[in-house]
Image (cartoon, rainbow, N blue to C red):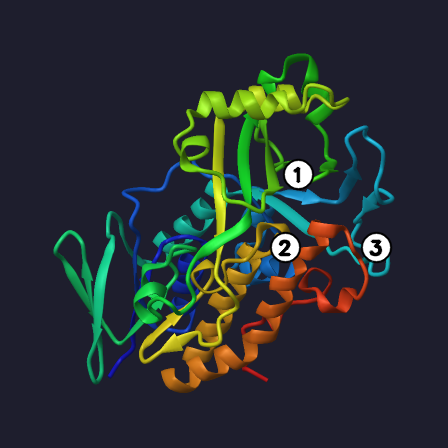
Amino acid sequence: MTKKIIIIGGGIAGLAMALFLKRANIESVVYEQATKYGIAGGNFVIHPSGVQVLEELGLGEVLKANSHQMTDIKVMDKEGNSIFEDMEMDGEKDGEKEGMPHLINIARFHLIDILYQKSIEQGIEINFGKRLKSFTEGDDHIQVFFEDGTEAKGTLLVGADGVRSKIRSILFPFPNYPLKYAGKWGVYGLVGLDKLNEHREFFDSETSLIYFHENFNLFISKHHPTDNEISWSMIVNEEKKVSKKHFEEKPIETFRSDLANQFSDWEAPIKQLIENTDNFIPKQLFKIDLMNHYSYGRVVLIGDALHTADPNAGMGTTLGLEDALYLSKLLRDHDYDDAFHYYETDRKDRAAKVFHSASILDNLTLENTEDFAFFGEGLSVSWDKRE
C-alpha cells in the first residue's frame, strides 16, 4: 500500500516533516488546529544542526534574510558586569570562545512563514481549523477523526501537535508521561524599536544580551536583519506553580506593569523595554519526563509532542527539525516498523543530552560540556543514507 502520512500539527516540526516527506516522494497531509497563521509568538534560537536541516530544504538564503546571526553575545548581571568574557562567534573553526556554537535568532512567525511558503510551493496540502478528536488503527491504515465531524485516512500518523499533544495522551494515556509543571514560567515579547525613544540606542545593536539575576535569565536580541523590532524572553525559576488568578487570569496590562516594575533599579533600561512591548506572552511551562517509547503501531511523535524541551536548553526548535529530517529519511529507506525502531534508538541519546542541557542556564555550570547537547553536533542532519 502506498504511504500516505497524516501529520497532526502545522508548526515548525510538522511543516518540516511534510517537506522532507515530499523530498522522499511520500505523500503527506497536514492538519493544523489554528484557523490561519498570523504574526504571533515569540522568538527561537536555532543551533547549527537546526540551520543545516533548513539548508537541506533549500532554505538557507531565505533563512539568512529573515534571522539574526548571533555573532556577539554579552552575558551580564544586574549591574551590567560581564559574567563570562564577551563571546564573539565569528565563524572561525577554533575561534568559538567557551566552545559556543554559531546560533541564529528568529521570530516564530518568520520561520513558520518560510516553511509555509515552501510547503505551498511544493503543493503540500495543509488544512486549517482541524482539532483532533481521536484515531483508530486498522490492519493497514489509520483513521483520524476531528472535532468538526470530518475524518481522514492514511497509512501512518505523525504527532507534531506540541507540548500538550493530544496524540501523545491517546497513545500513552495517564499515568504514562503526565504533563507536569516544569518549575518555571516564561514571558516572550516582541517590541518595536521606535517605541523605545531615548532607549533605542541601547537595544539597537548586533549584540545579543543575556542577563542572569537570582532566579531568572533574560535574553534580548534582534531576530531579523531589517525588521524594526527586537525580541526578548525571560525564564523564571519558580518551584511552586503560580495560581491561575495570579497568572493565566491576570490582565495582560497588569502583568506587564508588575513585571516591568521589578526592573526599576536596574542600570539597563529593561523596565522601559517591557513597558513598551505590545506582543507580550506569559506562559507557565510544562514538561514530561524523557520518553522510553517514541511510537506505537502506526503512530509516531516528533518535536515538542515528544520532547517538551526545557526553554533553558534553547534547543526545542532544533530538536524538532532534526526529528523531521531523520524520521523522513528513515521512512524513505525502510518499512515503517523498522523506521520507527531506528528513529527511537538513534535519537534517544541526543534527546537526553538536550534534556540535561537546561542545567547550563539553571546553574551556569560549564563543566563536563561533552554531556550537553549545546556544545555538540546533532545526530547526522544530512539527507544521505542512514549510517
Q: Nearer the viewer, residue 234 or 36?
A: 234
Q: Residues within 10 Å of mark 3 (few under 14, many from 20)?
A: some
SS assignment at label 3: helix
- Mark 2 or 3: the one toward you: 2
- Quadrant where the N terminus is found in the figure: bottom left
SS assignment at label 2: helix
The amino acid type of the residue labelled 3 equals Glu
Which residue lies at the image location 50% right of the left edge and 26% below the top edge?
A: 255
- CB atoms at circles 2 and 1 under 8 Å apart? no
In this rendering, is residue 178 above or below 229? below
How far apart marks 2 and 1 lie (CA) works out to: 13 Å
Q: Tell me which corner region of the image, top left, top right, bottom left or bottom right, holds residue 203.
A: top right
The residue singled out by tag 1 in the image is 219
In this rendering, is residue 289 above or below 242? below
- Quadrant where the C terminus is found in the figure: bottom right
Q: Residue 9: which disc?
A: none
The residue singled out by tag 3 in the image is 98
Which residue lies at the image location 69% right of the left edge and 17% below the top edge?
A: 199
- From the viewer's perspective, tell me whether residue 5 is left or right of residue 104: left
Q: Residues within 10 Å of mark 2 (few under 14, many from 20)?
A: many
- From the viewer's perspective, tell me whether residue 337 is left or right of residue 286: left
The amino acid type of the residue labelled 1 equals Phe
How far apart marks 1 and 3 lie (CA) works out to: 18 Å
- From the viewer's perspective, tell me whether residue 142 is left or right of residue 160: left
Q: Earlier in the sequence, mark 2 or mark 3?
A: 3
The residue singled out by tag 2 in the image is 313
Which residue lies at the image location 59% right of the left edge and 17% below the top edge?
A: 194
Q: Position of residue 384 (x, y in %)?
A: 56, 77
The amino acid type of the residue labelled 2 equals Ala
Q: Position of residue 65 (x, y in %)?
A: 58, 42
Q: Is any part of residue 192 visible from this angle?
A: no
Q: Tell me which corner region of the image, top left, top right, bottom left or bottom right, holds residue 47.
A: bottom right
